[in-house]
Image: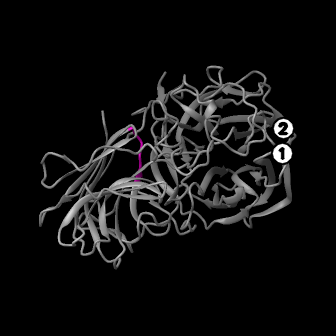
Amino acid sequence: MGIISNPVIPGMAPDPSILRIGDDYYLATSTFHWLPGIPIYHSRNLADWELMTHALDGREVNLRGTHTPAGIWAPHLSYDAKAQKYWLVFCHMKNMAGREFNAESYAMSADDIKGPWSAPVYLTSIGFDPSLYHEDGRHYLSILEWETRSGYQAPGTIVMAEVDLDTGKLINGWHRITNGFTTRGCIEAPQIYRHGAYYYMLAASGGTGYAHGVEMGRSRDIFGPYEPNPTGEPIITSSPRHLFSLGDPDAGHFEMYNPNSLMQKAGHGSLVETPDHEWYIAHLMARPLPGTTLNPLGRETSLQKMRWTRDGWLEMEDGSNVAKMTTESPAGMECAVCNASSEVYDSFSSGTYSKAFMTPYHHPDLSWVSVQDEKLWIYGRESFFSQNDPSILATRATSFSYQLQTKLDFRPVHYSQTAGTGLYYDSNNWIYAYVGLNDKEDQRIISILQAKLGQRIAFDFDTVPIPDGAVPELRWQYHYGRARAFYRLEDGAEWTPIADAVDVSYLSDEGVNGEPGEIGGFTALFNFIGSVDAYQHDSHAEFHYYQVKADK
């Protein structure tokens, strides 16, 4: 028996939707304000996952001005066996102010999972977390109907309709299905499966925080009525004690933190059956910094082995409902690694840059980023406070302790031109070690700039002059919520600190924005290289390499 270690996809990989075609497994996750959007991962053994492609290259949606944590939510992968076509539905959350939650859901299709994907077809604005179920040439759309009326159970009702996927039009309108199968409330992310004589509805519940879970109901008719799992509790969670929270539209539920578990927030799951008829659930999870409820790595993807009971209900292989950090691998499947790598290295020698790089709020294109002469050229544009066109390439942080490192050649002519590397959550929350000019504009320097909850913090007393002709290297050492910047001016020289270590634990889902008791973001910590030019938008930095290396 092999063992799979969780998370199988570390770092920002929430809301997983898993699909098997033949011997190949595919998995899609949310990306919020990051582009390209909706990564699709591939595996042959459920343990080792490789980023294969992104379904949204950035031209299909406009994410400029997106406020945390809006953007691209909860993609769902499915396969129409009759038409031999892949389908992907997703939600574009545009506004969350006033708890109005204005969202648009779309469907895309492809003959090959690698694409090209069709142009998005509009489906509905009724709510969020859409999914598709295909049967005998008919297609059924399930989604949360978001509730805005006073005095009604929040966040709303799961609804379902047959849909014409060529036009996006509903057939015979919506059917209201359920407000939930347990008392945890905050039901969302419905998905339909067929097993034996029943249709099973899987749904997330308990909110996006520490009470999160996966619950289940079943019906002999696709439109219900659905009977709830007789346990009255989630089939997957990190916090198994009973919770009554039917009126809560969403919450962090920090009181549900489980001190006996390394894994927290287990919920929002998706089922898959192996060729040998074993069942697994892919679900999101989180790992807080020790002694805190802060999750800088965000919501990650995890797996649990499941089994069907004699009376036709799904439960974890060990009979409990508490998600674990390890699970049994499928029969006959050997994993090469059995856990995911936390390292990234790109020397830009291939003529392009790694597909692991993403950009906040807009699409990375040749107008500002390219590979030339085996170096990555990034042209500076707007401040990193901008939600429009910051010149940032970033990769997901996947470890609690690591080094981020780069070497860059940058020749600014104005004090508003900078280039460097740092840690990033969103436009209001980041820290940046950069090459720029001193106040007199007659000397290049290295210094640090920080954004914390929208406040600009300049490290004016921590500057290092750069000799003429030197090409500096910059390094960040991140260790369990604290970060320290270093530099060196010659290859092989000792690294010198720029300033004292900084508490950056706020660069986490709970540390940004959010009202008391709620989660402020869904996207997690990223590492980045980038450039700013608020002068003429014509300066560029040449990056020799980019490296993220986990500490052993």
Of 507 and 26, which appears nearest the observer?
507
Task: Point out residue 494 in the picture as x, y percentages from the top left corner.
Answer: 14, 45
Q: Which residues are magenta?
A: 395-400
* Colour scheme: one colour
Quarter-wise, where is residue 180 in the image? Answer: top right
Quarter-wise, where is residue 149 in the image? Answer: bottom right
208 is higher (above) or lower (below) than 30? above
Q: CA distance from mark 1 to mark 2?
A: 7 Å
Residue at (63, 60) in percent of width and height: 92
Task: Point out residue 492 in the picture as x, y percentages from the top left corner.
Answer: 12, 48
Task: Point out residue 154 in the picture as x, y percentages from the top left corner.
Answer: 77, 46
Res. 226 mark = 2
Residue at (63, 37) in percent of width and height: 267
Mark 2 and mark 1 in contact (Cβ < 8 Å)? yes
Residue 397 covered by magenta stretch: yes
For the question of whether residue 154 can be seen, the reply is yes
Residue 521 covered by magenta stretch: no
Crowd class of label 1 (few under 14; some 14 to 19; many from 20; radius 10 Å): some
List the residue tagged with mark 1: 177
315 is higher (above) or lower (below) than 198? above
Of 123 and 474, which appears nearest the observer?
474
Circle 2 SS class: loop
